[in-house]
Image (spheres, coloured by chain):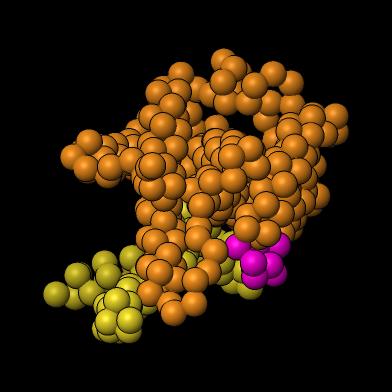
Chain colours: A orange, B yellow
């Protein structure tokens, strides 16, 4: 019988991958800050924020989906590893979402709202994303409020599926039904010819890939810490005098 | 020497003249300088702070599990009790 807490081996391939991520993101940073941009009025140099703000949305979505996948797998199989993976993916997703929201606030303050002098003007996409982050953040509050591990895993997996199901409506459907300053109210933002200057396109793609890979690295780190915790827990239970329920 | 002093003084005056009159909003002026490039710096710093936040919470968990494993190793082995 295989150990339910067995992770893939983080050996040579993993180490090579992390070096690739490190070099990739470093090159992206240099290109993002020195490369040629379309210097438009209002946007000016802040067009470079495209390389940092938008990839955070990709990370938010990708890891929310990963979290939902592992939550569903946990409900189907009851394996602790899926619960730990789901929690780690949600954390990466939430941190990326927080970064995206705060960078968006700063960016809009000095572009859209430069004359208006405001930090927040209820842009539909910003508002809906803030709501979505609150829904997602409640996942961690839920986890923190249940002590019994199996119960916590089951409840939070069900909640994660609910929280993911609101995401397309709040961040995709509704903002397109309302007036927004965000680009791409029609079509796919940042992918159409209108929304991105040709000289910025490839740096943007490289940046999106780089931040997704960086998110994956952080995610694996988190999973490894969580699995080590579970193994330490199991060890403590094994050496305890009274027999207790084993982790599955 | 005097000529140099004059040049320096002129430069200082030129810099002061160039300074925006709306001194009540120093943050605003700073962010809008150099074609708004400081806004990009701000965004990069926010990304960096977010990464630090993630590392800090993960590292805290790691430190806790390390302490637990240390304690488990220091405790007498379970078989010795029987």
Task: Give the percent coordinates (x, y) of residue A25.
Answer: 33, 41
Seen as rendered, the residue at the extreme top is A193
Give the image quarter of residue A206.
Answer: top left
Number of numbered discs on residues: 0
Seen as rendered, the residue at the extreme front is B82
Quadrant, the N terminus of chain A: top left
Left or right of A173 in this view: A160: left
The residue nearer to you, when weighing A96 against B5, is A96
Task: Give the percent coordinates (x, y) of residue B70.
Answer: 29, 78
Left or right of A111 in this view: A202: left
The residue nearer to you, when weighing A241 against A116, is A241
Residue B37 in view: no
Task: Give the percent coordinates (x, y) of residue B24.
Answer: 63, 73
Seen as rendered, the residue at the extreme right is A178
Q: Is residue A47 above or below residue A141?
A: above
Q: Is residue B6 part of the magenta span, yes or no?
A: no
The residue at the point 54 percent across, 24 percent down is A196
Q: Is residue A122 above or below residue A194?
A: below
Residue interval drawn in magenta: A141-149
The residue nearer to you, when weighing A76 against B31, is A76
Task: Give the percent coordinates (x, y) of residue A166.
Answer: 77, 40
Left or right of A97 in this view: A205: left
Seen as rendered, the residue at the extreme left is B1
Magenta stretch: dominant secondary structure: helix
The residue at the point 22 percent across, 42 percent down is A11
The residue at the point 41 percent across, 32 percent down is A209
The residue nearer to you, when weighing A67 against B27, is A67
The residue at the point 65 percent across, 42 percent down is A75
Q: Is residue A142 part of the magenta span, yes or no?
A: yes
Residue A79 in view: yes
Left or right of B9 in this view: A150: right
């Amino acid at each position: 019988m295989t150990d339910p807490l067995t992770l893939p081996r983080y050996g040579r391939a993993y180490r090579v991958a992390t070096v690739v991520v490190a070099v990739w993101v470093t090159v992206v940073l240099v290109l993002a800050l020195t490369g040629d941009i379309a210097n438009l009025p209002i946007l000016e140099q802040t067009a470079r924020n495209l390389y940092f703000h938008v990839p955070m949305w990709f990370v938010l979505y990708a890891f929310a989906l990963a979290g939902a996948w592992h939550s569903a797998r946990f409900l189907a199989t009851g394996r602790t590893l899926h619960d730990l993976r789901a929690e780690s993916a949600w954390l990466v997703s939430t941190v990326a979402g927080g970064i995206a929201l705060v960078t968006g606030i700063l960016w809009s303050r000095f572009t859209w709202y430069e004359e208006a002098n405001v930090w927040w003007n209820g842009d539909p996409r910003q508002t809906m994303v803030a709501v979505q982050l609150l829904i997602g953040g409640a996942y961690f509050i839920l986890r923190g409020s249940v002590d019994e591990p199996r119960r916590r895993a089951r409840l939070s997996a069900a909640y994660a599926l609910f929280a993911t199901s609101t995401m397309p409506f709040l961040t995709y459907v509704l903002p397109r039904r309302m007036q927004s300053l965000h680009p791409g109210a029609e079509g796919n933002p940042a992918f159409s010819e209108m929304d991105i200057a040709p000289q910025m396109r490839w740096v943007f793609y490289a940046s999106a890939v780089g931040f997704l890979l960086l998110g994956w690295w952080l995610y694996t780190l988190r999973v490894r810490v969580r699995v080590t915790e579970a193994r330490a827990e199991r060890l403590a239970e094994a050496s305890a005098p009274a027999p207790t329920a084993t982790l599955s | 020497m005097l000529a140099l002093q004059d040049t320096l003084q002129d430069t200082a005056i030129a810099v002061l003249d160039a300074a925006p009159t709306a001194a009540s909003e120093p943050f605003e002026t700073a962010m809008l300088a150099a074609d708004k490039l400081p806004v990009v710096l701000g965004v990069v710093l926010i990304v960096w702070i977010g990464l630090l936040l993630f590392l800090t919470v993960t590292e805290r968990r790691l430190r806790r599990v390390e302490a637990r494993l240390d304690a488990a190793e220091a405790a007498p082995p379970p078989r010795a009790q029987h």
